[in-house]
Amino acid sequence: MRQRFLLSVILAGVFSPILIAQTAPTEKPAKAKDKSGAFDPHDLSGKWNRVSPFQSYSNVPGGANELQAYLLGQAPAPQKLDVETAEAPFTPEGKAKFDKNIPSYGRRITAPMLGNDPQAMCDPWGVPRMLNGQVAGPHATIEIVQLPDRMFTFSQWHHDYRMVWTDGRPLPKLEDVEPRWNGYSVGKWEGDTFVVNSVGFDDRTWLDHNGYPHTDQMRLEERYRRLDADTLELVMTITDPQYYSKPFRSDTKIWKLDREGGKAWDEQIYCVPSEEFKFNKLIRDGGVGKEQRP
Amino acid sequence: MLTALYTSTGKAIESVGIRQAEGSGMRKHLIVCLIAGGIGGAPAFAHHGTSVTYQTDKTITLTGTVTEFSFSYPHPQLYFDVKDADGNIQHWGSEFAPTPLMMKQMNVGWARDTIKTGDTITITCNPHRVPGSTACLAKELIVNGKKLTVGPGRPPAQGPPAQGKE
């Protein structure tokens, strides 16, 4: 059943131009034009590569990584990155939880053997972390597929997807749903902005690779705009008063349409427990017993 | 104020300076300065904590026999046996920093089937920070006498590609 479902999703992706033509915002705007050519601002489909600098949920200190082009041998080592940052509006409880999350990235970088990043156990990322596109290029990608009644976002890294209903159903009440890894999401168009609201997230996920936490009471709003044929913008805001004293807004995530990469074979980057656990034990943890670790 | 948040012992140094913006309370500016040098120009690439797991300023060279090569994500893994001076076998493991796709884009010229179980290898790598460990971060490889490029920051491989496909 699951395979049949996945196949249908893949086929939907292949034939997405046809399906998008059937997508049903009630009043579809006239196609806009820009120098990149015609595009439909209500069509978000395609493979998108993140180009905005922050790999964290928001523009927090230590959340950027400008190394990817250098790593690929495409640019010299970066000398300086000067960007505006701000710390999260933690409550004391939120800050305490943050301090318990020990990441292997960013300003609190810690050796994985001493950390507790849930991805080391191949746990799912959850939606905010998936949408950060946090991995360095060429892996900072998402792919969006629109159907008449829902939208899928695929994350190549961890080979995960999330679903957003667009059939007009209301967002479920928080007290009526069991927390799930990717929560419960509904979306609608407000002008040329696609607005997704979600509740019901499993609180074991982190907002990003820096270890910013959330509770299972978190509400997530995503606002997408296709700025031109090749540019997609996303701003997320979470409301989670137990951990954050006010709504916590992400930085503005920008992706560029990957026209060539979108035609490539699926990389299928799963986190495979049998590989990951062996790797952790024999390589990342040094191949030594726990008593020898620092 | 310049605050060193993390400085590896290697030649790759990442430091972060934070300055308070005037009248802006929590708002700060972040300056990331990266100075890279040394072997392969190895950067403090915060991918899965690599830079704090290995001693990136040191290299060791080992010769052994491949027991397993896994061209996996996020890091290809190479397992091999090394005979010590007393003739005892040590089981070693090494990871490659770039993913398979990154290696392809760096034109390293080799891939999955280049390394096989039973091959003789000489590997130059950054040792793990834990004393007594049998793991390292691969920098250079010689497999059955043929030199293979591994690490990031190196120029594309010259000459005909080694045997192998993506």
Image (cartoon, grey):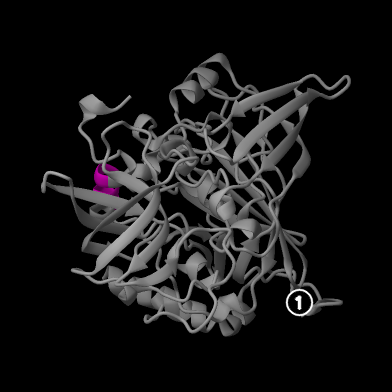
In this view of the protein, which residue sits in the foreground, A87 or A250?
A87
Magenta stretch encompasses residue A80: no
- Dividing the image into 4 quarters, which one contains the C terminus of chain A? top left
Spot occupied by residue B54 in the image (x, y as percentages of width and height): 42, 40
Residue drawn at x 44%, y 29% is A102
In this view of the protein, which residue sits in the foreground, B121 or A152?
B121
Q: Which residues are magenta?
A: A276-282
Spot occupied by residue A125 in the image (x, y as percentages of width and height): 44, 47
Residue drawn at x 65%, y 59% is A69
Spot occupied by residue A159 in the image (x, y as percentages of width and height): 41, 61
In this view of the protein, which residue sits in the foreground, B19 or A134?
B19
In this view of the protein, which residue sits in the foreground, B116 or A159?
B116
Q: Is residue A243 above or below residue A48?
A: above
Badge 1 is on which residue?
Answer: A39
Label 1 sits on what residue type?
Answer: Phe
Q: Quadrant of residue B117?
A: bottom left
Residue drawn at x 61%, y 74% is A23
